[in-house]
Amino acid sequence: MNTSTYSAEELSKATGQFLDRHLKPIAHRTGRHVGEVLDELAEDLFTGGVLAYMMANRMAEQDPAIDVNAEAGAMFLAMIRKMPGRVNLAKTLVGAIYREIRAAEGIQG
């Protein structure tokens, strides 16, 4: 993976992806504006989410078979686990993802 400094274009693309994939759906589900959701999001979580997308986009440039959303999600969870005071959040997110997958597959319990 290219580890040079990220460009303004990469930052803008990754920010848009994070907003579109995560914050806009939250805003839609809760009936709030994206700006409100963003205002309440901790800076470390926003930064981690955008960085995960920047890294995933670079990986996808090298290997087009990479699913950018899945790769960014995995990296984001890994980052959260290492953030001071965020281990429980990582566990909660992994649990929610697990339950969502099981529900989508029609598995009870």
Image: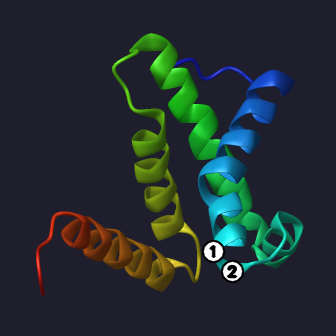
Q: Relative to 101, is 79 on the left or the right? A: right
* Residue at image location 68% in from the left, 20% down from the top: 4
Which type of secondary structure does the marked residue at label 2 adopt? helix
Residue 108 is situated, as x and y percent measured from the top left of the image, at: 12, 82
The quarter holding residue 38 reads bottom right
In the displayed structure, 80 sits above or below 31; it is above
Asked whether the beta carbons under mark 1 and mark 2 sit within 8 Å of each other, the answer is yes
Residue that mark 1 sits on: 29
The quarter holding residue 27 reads bottom right
Q: Alpha-carbon neighbours of circle 2 within 10 Å: few (<14), some, or many (≥20)?
A: few
Q: Alpha-carbon neighbours of circle 1 within 10 Å: few (<14), some, or many (≥20)?
A: few
Whether residue 7 appears in this view of the structure is no
Q: Relative to 59, is 102 on the left or the right? A: left
Which type of secondary structure does the marked residue at label 1 adopt? helix
In the displayed structure, 58 sits above or below 72; it is above
* Residue at image location 27% in from the left, 76% down from the top: 99
Residue 65 is situated, as x and y percent measured from the top left of the image, at: 33, 20
Q: Amino acid at mark 2?
A: Thr
Q: Relative to 19, is 104 on the left or the right? A: left
Disc 1/disc 2 C-alpha distance (Å): 4 Å
* Residue at image location 57% in from the left, 70% down from the top: 83
Q: Amino acid at mark 1?
A: Arg
Whether residue 36 appears in this view of the structure is yes
What sort of colour scheme is used for the picture?
rainbow
Residue that mark 2 sits on: 30
What number of labels is visible? 2
> Which label was assigned to residue 100?
none
Residue 62 is situated, as x and y percent measured from the top left of the image, at: 45, 12
* Residue at image location 86% in from the left, 26% down from the top: 8
Residue 48 is situated, as x and y percent measured from the top left of the image, at: 64, 55
The quarter holding residue 67 reads top left
In the displayed structure, 106 sits above or below 85; it is above
